[in-house]
Amino acid sequence: MNVLDTFSLKGKIALVTGGAGLYGRQIVAALAEAGARTFMAARDIEKLKIVAEQERARGYDVTALQLDLSLDRSIEKLHADIIERAGICDILVNNAVTRSATDGWDHDLEAYDQSLHVNASALFKITRIFAKNMQIQKSGSIINISSMMGMVGVEMGNYSGTDMSANPSPIYFYEKGGMINFTRWAASILGGDNVRVNCLSPGGYENGQPAPFIENYSARTQLGRMANDTDLMGAIVFLASDASAYLTGTNIPIDGGYTAK
């Protein structure tokens, strides 16, 4: 087989949680362009439908489905719907995230539990429920979308000259760091059935950021810029496809070199 053919996702079934957000949008586009029949699922089904319609207008097979990661029954229904429609799910991208308890760390347990319930507990459940089918098939690729913030401490200098993150919260750093090690754990558990689990840790996204933040953050990276609308696409296709058939349990920073400094 020609090496370029190993990047093809033709005949594959993919699920992306989230999908209408900054990174989700390009993840969906990348999988669809590579040939996968792609499902996207989140609470805000109307936003997803807009993205799905845009992708179908480009000639790609993309479907929007409902998902509330805070509810067991919603995760189970999504799984049942996809298996009924497609028979299997070859690629799972855990991209959805809730943002709560973000203003400092003076919160009660309930506020933290709300965030952890979706960003940690639901991650475990949805990965397990789809991995069961992949184990039967003896193939599959699970991709967790973490963040470079799961690899480093907060850089307060990035916020100089802005009114952003004057009182940062530990929760996002905690959850994304945990996702990276969950990736290693799941890869160890599922590897015997040829189910691969890897992680991508994107850096900061330029769209909509204040000019001082962009300047500060860009100076902190090796490539001198923040991420754009396509920077994640190649890595997603690589991890989803047979091009990465011998890669599992790894975390790849897509951060312009931010964590290399």
Image: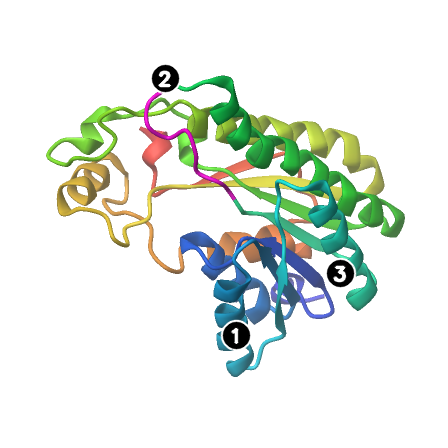
Disc 2: CA contacts within 10 A as few (<14), some (14-19) or many (>=20): few
Residue 55: which disc?
Answer: 1
**Front residue of 129 and 203:** 129
243 up-or-down from 34: above or below = above
| Residue indicated by mark 2 | 106
| Residue indicated by mark 3 | 82
Label 2 vs label 3, nearer the camera? 2
Could you tell me which quadrant the N terminus lies in? bottom right
Q: Secondary structure at mark 2?
A: loop
Could you tell me which quadrant the C terminus lies in? top left
**Front residue of 123 and 238:** 123
Q: Is residue 98 magenta?
A: yes
Q: Are marks 2 and 3 in contact (CB under 8 Å)?
A: no
Magenta residues span 97-106
**Front residue of 10 and 204:** 204
Question: In the image, what residue type sits under mark 2?
Answer: Asp
